[in-house]
């Protein structure tokens, strides 16, 4: 335990040094045409991270100091109706797998730079938009949030359970999506048709994903949802979604609420997300199960400091499979909103029939777009 505490302190000190060594960007990296109708915008996301994870036998601590995400971002507009977005990612760069049974134990991830998002958008006002390309499918709110705007250190571990078995890339698939915000931007709809799992000669039906949301105070109209506005905005959304391909099914329900309080000096954020996965015969590696996520944060010190909690669980329909859950409690320090932040969390990972494992995370984020 003393060794664990020493590692925690050394990692925290190292991360604080990185924070104060970093300087904020002062202007957008953007090129505009002379008439202002088109633009080209550049950005990046980097998240250095420390992870301390108790080993499965509870006799030692796995230590990783790595880059959780490294992304290059390009976007822009071509005219009043046309825009585009493109980004790469190299996740877990330099990380060593803390779990036994890996092919090359102790080997650091050398990085696989790949396309994370790539789509064009045609817009005919707020009520009708078309997104086409490699898109994040809209089967849940938490799964359609930007990684750069999360409340906690990371997504819940069960938000993208379909990605591996379905051949996706962190919730992304290739397809076309209709999206709009009718009824005075109090409603949102998303309906996507995507590749999904392809069989021999690619003869099976395509994947259909949909989502509808009710916003009491007005919609979030960006392609990606925000995990938090640091308690500075009154925002609420109540949604549900589905994802269907042959006998594979995903259903979801979610709620998000954030509001300033105490004359806008403080604020709080709360989110709930439920997902029912069932891969059926098409995706047998995705057994029937329910996944839950609840997270909340209270924003203090002029919205710059946010203590938060995050709880996730997965319950299998089959009694022969071990249910899992995890709990994290921590604090986010918003040095410059989502552009620069420092997050710390400590928690426990549980799986039925196995010892609980302690996990500590420290993450610094530098985001500019």
Image (cartoon, helix red, strand yellow):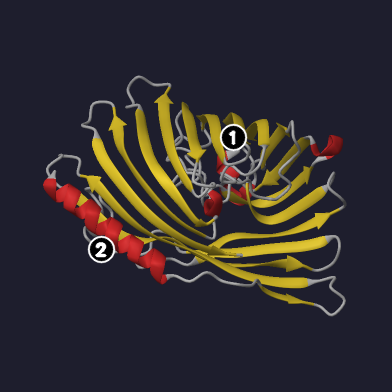
Residue found at the far bottom of this picture: 34
The tag on residue 107 is 2
Using the rendered image of the protein, determine whether residue 123 is visible from the camera's viewpoint.
Answer: yes
Quadrant position of the N terminus in the picture: top left
Q: Report whether 253 appears left or right of 308.
A: right
Quadrant position of the C terminus in the picture: bottom right
Q: x and y percent of residue 5 in the render?
A: 19, 48
The tag on residue 262 is 1
The tag on residue 167 is none
User: What residue is at 14 percent from the left and 47 percent from the top?
Assistant: 60
Q: Report whether 275 appears left or right of 157.
A: right
Q: Quadrant of residue 86?
A: bottom right
Q: Secondary structure at mark 2?
A: loop
Q: Is residue 355 above or below residue 133?
A: above
Q: Secondary structure at mark 1?
A: loop
User: What residue is at 77 percent from the left and 45 percent from the top?
Assistant: 178
Q: Is residue 224 above or below residue 44?
A: above
Q: Is residue 106 above or below residue 260?
A: below
Q: How many marks?
A: 2
Q: x and y percent of residue 108 in the render?
A: 29, 64
Q: x and y percent of residue 126 in the render?
A: 83, 47
Q: Nearer the viewer, residue 278 or 233?
A: 233
User: What residue is at 21 percent from the left and 60 percent from the top?
Assistant: 106
- CA separation in Å, label 2 and label 1: 51 Å
Dot 1 surroundings within 10 Å: few (below 14), some, or many (20 or more)?
few
Residue found at the far top of this picture: 319
Residue found at the far front of this picture: 263
* Camera-side mark, 2 or 1: 1
Q: x and y percent of residue 78 in the render?
A: 80, 69
Q: Nearer the viewer, residue 184 or 38?
A: 184
User: What residue is at 60 percent from the left and 50 percent from the top?
Assistant: 173
Task: Specify which label sits upstream in the sequence, 2 or 1.
Answer: 2
């Amino acid at each position: 335990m003393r060794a664990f505490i020493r590692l925690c302190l050394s990692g925290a000190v190292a991360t604080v040094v990185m924070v104060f060594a970093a300087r904020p960007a002062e202007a957008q990296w953007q090129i505009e045409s002379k008439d202002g109708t088109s633009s080209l915008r550049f950005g990046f996301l980097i998240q250095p991270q420390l992870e301390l994870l108790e080993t499965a036998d509870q006799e030692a601590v796995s230590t990783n100091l790595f880059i959780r995400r490294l992304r290059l971002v390009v976007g822009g507009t071509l005219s009043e109706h046309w825009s585009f977005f493109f980004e790469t990612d190299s996740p877990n760069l330099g990380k060593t797998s803390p779990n036994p049974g890996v092919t090359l134990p102790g080997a650091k991830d050398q990085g696989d730079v790949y396309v994370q998002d790539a789509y064009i958008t045609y817009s005919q006002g707020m009520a009708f938009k078309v997104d086409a390309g490699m898109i994040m499918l809209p089967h849940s709110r938490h799964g359609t949030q930007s990684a750069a705007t999360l409340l906690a250190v990371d997504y819940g571990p069960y938000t993208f359970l379909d990605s591996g078995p379905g051949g996706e890339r962190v919730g992304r698939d290739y397809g076309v999506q209709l999206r709009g915000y009718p009824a005075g931007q109090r409603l949102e709809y998303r309906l996507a048709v995507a590749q999904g799992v392809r069989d021999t000669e690619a003869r099976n039906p395509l994947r259909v994903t949909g989502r509808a949301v009710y916003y009491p105070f007005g919609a979030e109209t960006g392609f990606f949802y925000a995990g938090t506005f640091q308690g500075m905005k009154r925002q609420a959304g109540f949604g549900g979604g589905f994802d269907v391909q042959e006998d594979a099914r995903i259903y979801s329900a979610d709620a998000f609420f954030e509001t300033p309080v105490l004359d806008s000096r403080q604020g709080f954020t709360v989110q709930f997300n439920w997902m029912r996965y069932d891969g059926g015969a098409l995706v047998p590696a995705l057994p029937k199960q329910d996944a839950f996520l609840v997270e909340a944060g209270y924003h203090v010190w002029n919205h710059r400091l946010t203590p938060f909690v995050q709880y996730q669980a997965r319950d299998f329909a089959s009694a022969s499979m071990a249910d899992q859950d995890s709990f994290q409690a921590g604090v986010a320090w918003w040095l410059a909103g989502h552009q620069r932040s420092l997050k710390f969390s400590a928690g426990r990972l549980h799986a039925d029939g196995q010892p609980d494992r302690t996990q500590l995370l420290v993450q610094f984020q530098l985001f500019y777009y």
